[in-house]
Amino acid sequence: MSRSIFSKLVYTSVALVLLVSGRVHAEGYEELYRDHRDSLYQIRIIEKSSNSKSGLGSGFQIRADGLVATNYHVIAEFIRHPGKYRLEYLMEDGSKGKLELLDVDVINDLALLRHDEAGRDFLALAEETPRRGEIIVAMGNPLDLGTTVVPGTYNGIASGSFYDRIHFSGSVNPGMSGGPVINTRGEVVGINVATAGNQISFLVPVDKLAKLKRDYEQRQAPVSDFKKVIYKQLKDNQQHIMDNVLSADWQRRQLGNAYVVGEVVPAIKCWGRSSEEDEDNPVRRIDKGCTGQDTVYLADEFNTGRVEYEFFWLDASDLSPTRFYSEYERQMSSFFPGNRAGEDDVSNFQCQQQFTEQPRTSKEQAEESPVIARTTYCVRRYRDYPDLYDIFYLSLTVDHDNQGLVSHFTLSGFTRESADAFTRKFTSEIQWH
Amino acid sequence: MALIIEVLNKIGRVSERHRFEGESATIGRAYDNDLILGDTHLDAHHLRLTRDEEGIRLQDLDTLNGTWYRHGRARRKRVEGPRVIESGDELIIGKTHLRLVDSAAEVAPAQPLHSMEDFIERIAHPAVLTILLLLIGGTTLADNYLSQATEIEWKDNLQMLVTTFLGLAIYASVWSFLGYLVRQDSRFLAHFAIISLVALLFTGWEWLSGLLHFNFSLGDSGPTLNMLILGILLPAALWLALYLSLNLTPTWRWVVSLVVPWGFLGLGAIERAQFDSDFVGRPVYSTTLKHDSRRLRPPVSMEEFIDRSDELFDIELPEKKPKKEDKSESVAKNGAPEESEVGAPQN
């Protein structure tokens, strides 16, 4: 009896606490929404010829004079085809108007816009970083359904990326891109940018936006040539990634009888897989692949800034060389570039293919015959950013009767100097034992 | 002077010839005719031919299906009552076609025997043909075995052999049948030997081209070389088949055997040329892999390879194709559109 009374008591108190805290939160979100809805915008890309929406996103005002922030990817089509589209906003109260594009940061996926007839409501940018676990609230207009308020928690800067992104536990959905994420004091801590599903979302930290805003305030004028600005950002970014990768300590990992490269920096993640030799599968294969986790979005069909490498070890215990090489060829004949790009963005690939020779690196093997491989190197050039290239490298050893090592990498959006340095480092790191 | 009656087959070629010296001859199914034919649509005594000072006189013997004649390319006409016909006229009785020729008529000049005849005789010799077929069987099995690493079931091998030989036999049969119809000369073994030799040569070329791809990364010239080889092998095979089976004049034989294969190859080349000019979103390189023992070129050091790669970066960027959407230059240059530009009603 006493037990049941006790448990009833516990349940009641828990329910009470939940109810109260729920009410507090609910009131808190209502208030946040009420206080800040006049700073929220829906950003629309309107196709001029049909006068219809061809893209939607969210945005928010960050200064009394009508400065508005959103994601670069929301307005990317406008930059690519300025003659075809115009920018428009729609406010909560139904008012509509024109927007002027001022500046962009493609690396952090930000854009700065302005409109003249703005109200005075705006969101302040937070000076302090939230505490881990702190409740923060994402706002935006998902799927054109109307303004939505999504609470979640701040989980620090996501590890394993070349770019700082806040890990936010909450749902950010299409259409909310570019919307603000605010703390309970109503200050912007981040900008909605991406989601990995299941309440794992990513935000651009607000300091990136603060910098973009500061740059604009110093300049006092909109950017005159966006391609030039983006070009510089892409070049600086690839240099930053390459400096990072090349200065890292490249730990080697065993793969079959060879030693290859693993996760050289935290932003590059590796996976592995292997298949054993059996009746149906006379060739044993071990795969290892490593990929830079993020790319820079330039358009729906064009992304860049990726470092990716893969290795395959194949061997067979009892197979004639001709049969082994038939299988080797069959398994290793489809490699693709690491990024997407279309005809308007890049040239065709230009390739050279040679037999290459490298001395075996370990001392006791220095006397032995060198490693012979069939090596392919291809590049394609970016049309709008002519110092940047996609690079494709593939090297398949051919000097063993029934063993093969494949090393492959792709770089997207790197300069010829970066490509050269990476290729030299990459090829010198692989060892055959 | 005698009368020659030629019996024609379905495609108008002569299958039998009969010579009549007398003043008259009868044709029909009955055994007392001068020319006895088995066509069930004929009467027992179908027609009579008589020779007089005017020529050959033709008389239908009041038959069920009648007697028809055709002069040159004209439409056929029914014979009503006695009629004088000329040398070379065609008679149609029942389903049988006959041609009446005067023994004094001129014949076409002799066709010279072609020097290829000797070669055809040699490869169609049973011993040579056997060797060819053994080679084809052997290369088929070896190729099947060497081109994969997994175990192969004997059933698969058998099926492969049957398919290969059946394919060759069907080709030979078709030409043989044509030859039988047109020249009463089927030459099945000759056709079989020729197509087997061509198949063997092509297999040899495939092996060689694999080696070339591995060593010299043929790239675009790969398909061109392949086309060149087919451009020789196919006309040769077709020429021989036409020579054996049809009565074409030498000029026509050359024209047909060159135009048909080259036409098809040309269409393929045009299609490929269109594809070449297109944008390809992935690198195009040779994926052929063979053991080092098949390597014919010296390797370069990795250092040198990377040094050489530097040239690849000099890619010329052609001007973008002008598109409708990029019309408003002022906006493209400025990036930030003027107020008026954005507000201007465009539609």
Image: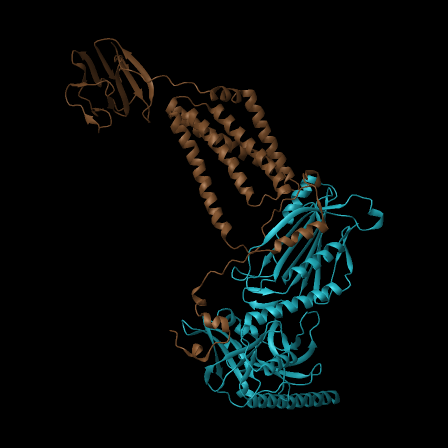
Asked if residue A406 is positioned above or below residue B91 in the image, the reply reads below
Can residue A176 be seen from the camera position used here? Answer: no
Please give the count of numbered marks on the rendered protein. 0
Q: Position of residue A124 (x, y in %)?
A: 61, 87
Q: Where is residue A311 in the image (x, y as percent from the top left)?
A: 70, 54
Q: In which quarter of the image is residue A324?
A: top right
Q: Where is residue A278 in the image (x, y as percent from the top left)?
A: 71, 47
What is the drawing colour of chain A?
Answer: cyan
Can residue A166 be seen from the camera position used here? Answer: yes
Q: In which quarter of the image is the C terminus of chain B?
A: bottom left
Q: The brown chain is which one?
A: B
Q: Which colour scheme is used?
A: by chain
Front position in the image: A194 or A234: A234
Q: In which quarter of the image is residue A207?
A: bottom right
Asked if residue B98 is positioned above or below residue A334 in the image, the reply reads above
Front position in the image: A383 or A399: A383
Front position in the image: A390 or B334: B334
Front position in the image: A313 or B165: A313
Classify residue B274 as left or right of residue A10. Answer: left
Asked if residue A228 is positioned above or below residue B15 in the image, the reply reads below
Q: Quadrant of residue B158?
A: top right
- Please name the residue shown 70% across and 38% down the image: B293
Q: Quadrant of the N terminus of chain B?
A: top left
Asked if residue A32 is positioned above or below residue A249 in the image, the reply reads below
